[in-house]
Amino acid sequence: MKSLNTRLLMAASLVLAAFLGITGIILDRAFRTSAESALQDRLQGNIYALLSAAELDASGQLRLPDGLPEARFSTPGSGLYAEVRGADGTQVWRSSSALGLQIPFISKLPAGERRLETLTIADGIVLSALSFGVAWETNQGNARDYIFSVAENLDGMHTQVQSFRRSLWGWLIGVALVLLAVQGSILRWSLAPL
């Protein structure tokens, strides 16, 4: 009986461990994908905010106001950076948050296209950057091409993913231990007559 009890407990434990391990891996990947998608959506939203704030001045030059809806653009080192370049790659505008940083944003991108990339800057800081090509119609009716780029530090997303990962595996291990204890008790009780 002891051998039968041990065999059943071992087999059930292996199946349970495999199931919970695979579940943990799938949930971890799903959360990471969701966090990356949310970051891309935030970057896209910030580009739209910059587009809505941009205006042409009397001379036909694109200008952005000093005060933008997202306050982090005005705070140096905030982790959220933006830049607008002309079709020739020259910088038209840059957020105050990028003060002192050399961020290698895209300098050539056709109107209507967008590109997402990961950039590494000084001190090993990793950014997720989204660039969007825009054809802006001037008062004279001709179009000028611009590239609106926004980048966000990935540290926040990585911290969020790590926190979720710790919580997920902690709960899965706790649930596994409880299930193993319940399973062992049920097996002992059901095999007692043998």
Image (cartoon, rainbow, N blue to C red):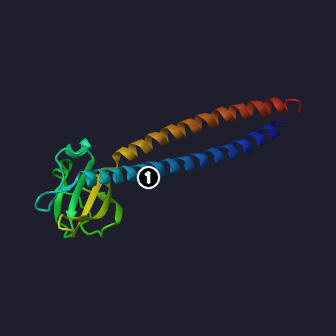
Left-right relation of 189 to 173: right
Is residue 61 depicted above or below 154 in this figure? below
Determine which quarter of the picture holds residue 67.
top left
How dense is the environment of label 1, judged by Cα within 10 Å: few (below 14), some, or many (20 and up)? few
Q: Tag 1's secondary structure? A: helix
Residue at coordinates 27% horizontally, 48% vertically from top-left? 80
Residue that lies at the very extreme toward the right in this rendered image: 194
State the count of labels. Answer: 1
Quadrant into which the N terminus falls:
top right
Residue at coordinates 60% horizontally, 47% vertically from top-left? 23
Is residue 130 depicted above or below 2 in this figure? below
Residue that lies at the very extreme toward the left in this rendered image: 59
Where is residue 5 shown, x and y percent of the image?
Answer: 79, 37
Left-right relation of 38 to 97: right
- The amino acid type, in three-letter code, at marker 1 is Ser
Residue at coordinates 59% horizontally, 34% vertically from top-left? 174
Viewer-nearest residue: 115 or 53? 53
Viewer-nearest residue: 5 or 50? 50
Where is residue 16 shown, x and y percent of the image?
Answer: 68, 43
Quadrant into which the C terminus falls:
top right
What residue did someone put label 1 on?
Answer: 37
Viewer-nearest residue: 100 or 122? 100
Viewer-nearest residue: 74 or 169? 74
Where is residue 84 shown, x and y percent of the image?
Answer: 22, 59
